[in-house]
Amino acid sequence: MAPPLMHVRGLSLRFGTKVLFDGAELAVSRGDRICLVGRNGTGKSTLLKVAAGLISADAGERFLQPGTRLAYLPQEPDFARRATAGEVVAEGLADPAETFRVAAILGELGVAPEASAAALSGGEGRRVALARALVGEPDVLLLDEPTNHLDLPAIEWLENRLAGFTGGVVMISHDRAFLTRLTRQTVWLDRGVARRLDAGFAGFEEWAEGLLEQETAERARLDKKIAEETVWSRQGISARRKRNQGRLRALADLRQERAEQRARLGAVKLAAEAGGLSGKLVLEATEVSYAWEGVPVVLPTSLKVLRGDRIGIVGANGAGKSTLLKLLMGELPPDTGMVRLGTNLTTVYLDQGRAALSDAATVWDILCPQGGDQVMVRGRPRHVVSYMRDFLFDDAQAKSPVGSLSGGEKNRLLLAVALAKPSNLLVLDEPTNDLDMETLDLLQETLSDYDGTVLVVSHDRDFLDRVATAIWALEGDGRVGEYVGGFSDYRRQRPAPAEAAKSAAAKPKPQRAEPPRKAAKLSYKDQREWEGLPARLAALEAEQEDLEKRLADPGFFARDAAGFSAATRRLAALATERAAAEDRWLELEILREELSG
């Protein structure tokens, strides 16, 4: 086994009385793809910063092989020192003379090098930060929430890029589909302890549940032994009046051990209060369209939503997802067509931009905007601090300003506000950003049990597979496609060539060293290849989906560790093959259009 490129071990760090981790270890070798998982607040980002050399732990050591290049992607990138996107990305170059790499990688991500760094949107800023981390071709990549605020094409681009990366990667992410596809090792940071699994995220949840069940059984045995020893100590005193001091000290040690065991973190308690029953028809849009400054955003579209539907809305950033929601909710008047809303609708709208939150307001102010100390939750008054605890806020945070909260805490606060209100139509614009996996699970369960109707915009493929009964896909040219099922069903149903063109849209067109040859049509060989590529893409996609299903089986690794490793390697190779096939199809399509023109 190759020696690690980077190794941190024996790490201990305490903030006040809170122990973030104690004796944590993280080793990264070439070819490793490690996911660092754990609840929000358990210290994952801090551990990654220690590994990056940005902060020091209270104890422990950090080793980096001489000559190893390391790149770190922070959760909240700061571009204040640079004026343009190109200048930001150039900071990551290993050789400052290789400036051509900056334009190339930004071209793949669809960001102009001269774009103002201060004016970048959340998604653009994340792409620029990724470009800065990748442009220098580092040996070790440390990525903190790399998919946050990325749209689906950008996430797929990053997956393909990392699938072909030969260095070592450590990534923190709450995107299950992303982790399942890419990772080969898992480090679980739980209650200050870092545990390692030599398998990717697909095998993590079953493994973690096994550890927790074992821990519960050991705690039960410890409790039983404490009870037995306590009975013995009392009987011994009355019978012999002479204590076995060794056994009494052992009993004291057992009690101390039990007292020091750190309890599992609590879970967010989510429940949506249903309003009165809406009519069977929730909304109907007939030939609705909208254009911005003459550019079509939504072409004439007819859509219908019935009571109980759970519609997932997907598409690239800027494709018009939020615009479509505003048209349907009556916040924007359509250029053509009409929207008819059903009867007895009570709507709660969760805004992507967190417009409902004021940084100067306190958590208490947001939950009790009319004053007082009571929140009406499912028709009953709850004390504001008690309700806050349901969403994992400390009592001391009640009077904290919203501006001091993390991204995940702000989203939990928005959910607390939204889910306290009675409704029969929930409209959620990117509710999953910054939420940890357990909160995502509970949100999914809440929406599944919700009696009303849900419209949700999300780039989280696993979340949409678990929640959505249908997908509306905005393809970027104003079209809105309807597909039955979750995200995986949508991917199977949409045509392979259209998928290839879409996923390649953010990539630069193939460059040629000399002008294309003039001919009346493609050569016989190129024509045959062009005709066969859609079937080839469909076959690769089908194989990829089959492997992803097999790897998602929690028992696969335990039954067949060698088969699990082979499937993981094949899945990584498929990403490269599929990207190459998509590029080739696009190249031939461009050439065909040029020749026919």
Image (cartoon, rainbow, N blue to C red):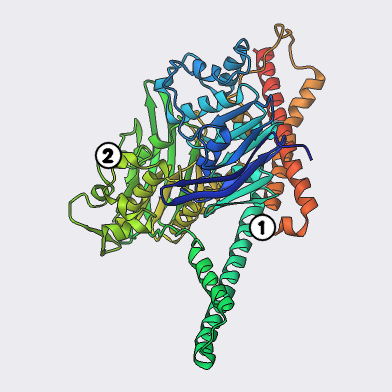
Answer with the quarter of the image where residue 568 lies.
Answer: top right
| Image height of 594 relative to 473, above or below | above
Q: Position of residue 400 (x, y in %)?
A: 29, 45
Residue occupying the far front of the picture: 242
Q: Residues within 10 Å of mark 1 (few under 14, many from 20)?
A: some
| Image height of 81 relative to 419, above or below | above
- Residue for point 60% across, 70% down: 218
Q: Which mark identifies residue 554?
A: 1
- Provide the residue designation for mark 2: 358
| Image height of 59 relative to 275, above or below | above
Q: Which mark identifies residue 421?
A: none
Q: Is residue 195 left or right of residue 146?
A: right
Report if residue 590 is visible in the image: yes
For mark 1, give the secondary structure.
loop
Q: Position of residue 334 (x, y in %)?
A: 34, 33
Answer with the quarter of the image where residue 277 lies.
Answer: bottom left
Marks 2 and 1, the one that precedes in the sequence: 2
Q: Are marks 2 and 1 in contact (CB under 8 Å)?
A: no
For mark 2, give the secondary structure.
loop
